[in-house]
Amino acid sequence: MPLSKHSTLTQFLIEERRRFPGASGDFNALLLDVALACKAIARVVAFGELGGLMGKHAPESGGSLNVQGETQQKLDVLSNEVFIRRTEWAGHLAGMAPEEMDLPHQIPAQYPRGKYLLVFDPLDGSSNIDVNVSVGSIFSILRGPDSGRDVTEADFLQPGTRQVAAGYALYGPATMLVLTVGNGVHGFTLDPNLGEFMLTHPDIQVPADTQEFAINASNSRFWEAPVTRYVNECLAGKTGPRGKDFNMRWIASMVAEAHRILMRGGVFMYPRDTKDPGRAGRLRLLYEANPIAMVMEQAGGRASSGREPMLGVQPSALHQRIGLVFGSKNEVERIERYHAEPARAAEHNPLFAERGLFRD
Ligand code: AHG
Ligand code: MN
Ligand code: MN
């Protein structure tokens, strides 16, 4: 394939930038550094067991925990390092905040500081690494203080509407980078021969309707009534109130579910539930929910906490968790409607009855 019909990511970014003649080029350079970090992680992931990087980080000391109290995999720690080293040197960033670090990462003194903040989940779905199932990286870019001072947690606590770019890389059968800079969503496939991301999926649109949903049904006994109602209605299929059959999927890599939904529609739910009263959901607002929400909305889909549009939520902490629902617009709106309606008992459904499929 000496002459590909596809543009490279670099060409795409330069052409986008021509629309903003005053732009400094910093932003594009930052996105290319992020893309390079993703390519580096893709290579390590592709080596699997041969790379010697499977399994838990620091198992000799009982395994390391991140700030969320989750066991870190070796690849969580390495991917975090790759993201930091590939992006901190160039003078575009004021600071960054990764999932794996308690506090924001300050740009080291030997490097210039810039005006953007980078927030990221270096490896999403890391429980899937050891079983060779797709994982990915998720990132969000915000504006930060332009003064060269150290960043604080408060600098990052901006609602998702303030993201200037967001996206993810998916390390699946092919590696893809999916990006929005606020002008639609564009998908790039890594050409392994050239080591370049090629624009293969311009202007992605999420279908407004779907017959596919994704939720971890093992949590069903902890769900709130609107979620139970929605899932029951899907499960009731053709003969139920929806009048059509639904399919269910659960990969346990949110980034992979987001990609499937972007490509063919669907709805993903990791709602707030009563499992652990100490946390308002499973997924993190700043580096999981918000970037995926921006991608969904830019592709004509929708993202919500169930109660309010995700992008409008004012964050209160760096590692804040939140209930997350996203995907095909009409389904997400339906779930929001169910949340807005006065509480009602879950309808009787044979699947949740005494001997039903989802009875605990
Ligand atoms: P991470 O690997 O970054 O900690 O995120 C994992 C998240 C998300 O990707 C996935 O949808 C969810 O956790 C899986 O949750 P369950 O363990 O409940 O399946
Ligand atoms: Mn994650
Ligand atoms: Mn992660």
Image (cartoon, rainbow, N blue to C red):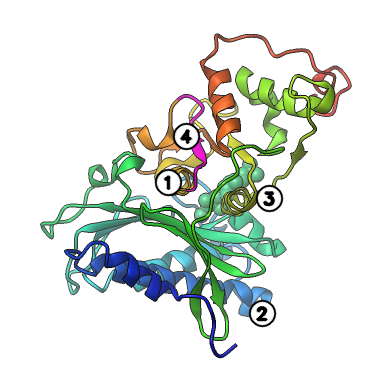
Which of 53/64 is in front? Answer: 53
Q: Residue at x 49, y 57 (%)?
A: 203
User: Disc 3, ligand 1: is the CB inside 8 Å?
Assistant: yes
Question: Amino acid under label 1?
Answer: Met
Earlier along the polypeptide chain: callout 2 or callout 3? 2
Q: Element type at marker 1?
A: helix
- Tag 1–tag 2 contact (CB < 8 Å): no
Alpha carbon of mark 2 to alpha carbon of mark 3: how far? Answer: 24 Å
**Number of numbered discs visible in the structure rendering:** 4
- Is 197 one of the magenta-colored residues? no
**Disc 4 residue lies near ligand 1 with CB under 8 A:** no
Does residue 287 show up? yes
Q: Is residue 57 visible?
A: no
> The residue under label 4 is which amino acid type?
Ile
Q: Position of residue 279 (x, y in %)?
A: 49, 31
Q: Horizontally, is 72 left or right of 257 in the view?
A: left
In the image as oriented, which residue stretches furthest toward the right? Answer: 355
Q: Which residue is mark 2?
A: 50
Mark 4 burial class by Cα count in 10 Å: few <14, some 14-19, many 20+: many
Q: Measuring from the top left, give residue 310's x and y in whole percent.
A: 43, 35
Q: How far apart are the alpha carbons under marks 4 and 3? A: 19 Å
Q: In this view of the protein, which residue sits in the foreground, 19 or 37?
A: 19
Give the residue at mark 3.
251
Q: Farthest left residue? A: 147
